[in-house]
């Protein structure tokens, strides 16, 4: 299955700065929460434009990820996530299912450029990683295809 990589949590010190609303919505994370979300990311479903959010919201508590995995618009799966040592950004490698070649084509053509991660506010499990052109957090971009998880980690080593 094709592998892609990018950043799902970047530097909020650049414009626009986060607001109190961003913090309330869970978009601004403490370093310890960011670390826990990275550790929980493997196996997380990759979705299209947060298509699973209503399903996630209607799921029983603790069953949100399972609901997203079973959603019909799930197009892939997170393979690994970590905090990059030099930047503090949260990086991710994800696969797109072989049954979704058009999604790969959109990423490769740069028609689909960004990532947005969903978690339950106050929780420490990533529920979905969504492919989008309108990320909720700044700087959350898809880098493109990668040959392996190991090669990408070597370029962006973890803490």
Image (cartoon, rainbow, N blue to C red):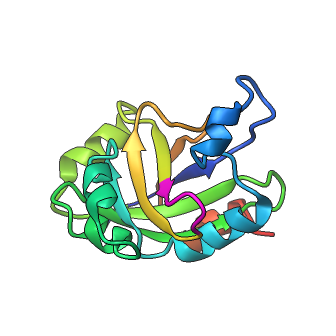
Q: Nearer the viewer, residue 149 or 30?
A: 30
Is 133 displayed left or right of 126 in the figure?
Answer: left
Q: Position of residue 127 (x, y in %)?
A: 43, 64
Q: Nearer the viewer, residue 1 or 138?
A: 138
Q: With respect to residue 74, does 28 lie above or below?
A: above
Tell me if residue 8 is in the magenta stretch: no
The dominant secondary structure in magenta is loop
Is 55 displayed left or right of 46 in the figure?
Answer: left
Q: Nearer the viewer, residue 98 or 133?
A: 133
Q: With respect to residue 145, does 42 lie above or below?
A: below
Residue 148 seen in the figure = no
Residue depicted at 56% across the width and 57% down the height: 121
Residue depicted at 75% across the width and 37% down the height: 12
Residue depicted at 37% across the width and 41% down the height: 108
Q: Which residues fall within the magenta stretch?
A: 118-123
Residue 91, quarter of picture: bottom right
On the rendered image, what quadrant is the N terminus found in? bottom left
On the rendered image, what quadrant is the C terminus found in? bottom right
Q: Position of residue 129 (x, y in %)?
A: 43, 56
Is 101 displayed left or right of 28 in the figure?
Answer: left
Q: Position of residue 105 (x, y in %)?
A: 27, 42
Q: Nearer the viewer, residue 98 or 56?
A: 56
Tell me if residue 120 is in the magenta stretch: yes
Is 97 displayed left or right of 16 in the figure?
Answer: left
Residue depicted at 41% across the width and 32% down the height: 133
Callout count: 0
Residue at the farthest top position: 15
Residue 16 seen in the figure = yes
Residue 37, quarter of picture: bottom right
Q: With respect to residue 61, does 140 lie above or below?
A: above
């Amino acid at each position: 299955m094709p592998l892609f990589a990018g950043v799902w949590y970047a530097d909020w010190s650049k414009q626009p700065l986060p607001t109190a609303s961003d913090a309330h919505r869970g978009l601004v994370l403490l370093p310890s929460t960011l670390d826990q979300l990275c550790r929980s990311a493997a196996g997380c479903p990759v979705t299209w434009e947060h298509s699973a959010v209503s399903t996630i919201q209607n799921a029983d508590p603790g069953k949100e990820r399972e609901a997203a995995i079973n959603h019909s618009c799930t197009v892939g799966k997170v393979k690994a996530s970590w905090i990059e040592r030099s930047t503090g950004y949260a990086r991710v490698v994800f696969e797109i299912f072989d049954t979704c070649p058009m999604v790969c084509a959109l990423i490769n053509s740069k028609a689909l450029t960004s990532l947005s991660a969903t978690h339950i506010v106050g929780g420490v499990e990533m529920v979905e990683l969504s492919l989008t052109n309108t990320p909720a957090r700044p700087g959350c971009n898809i880098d493109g295809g990668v040959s392996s998880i190991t090669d990408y980690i070597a370029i962006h080593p973890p803490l």
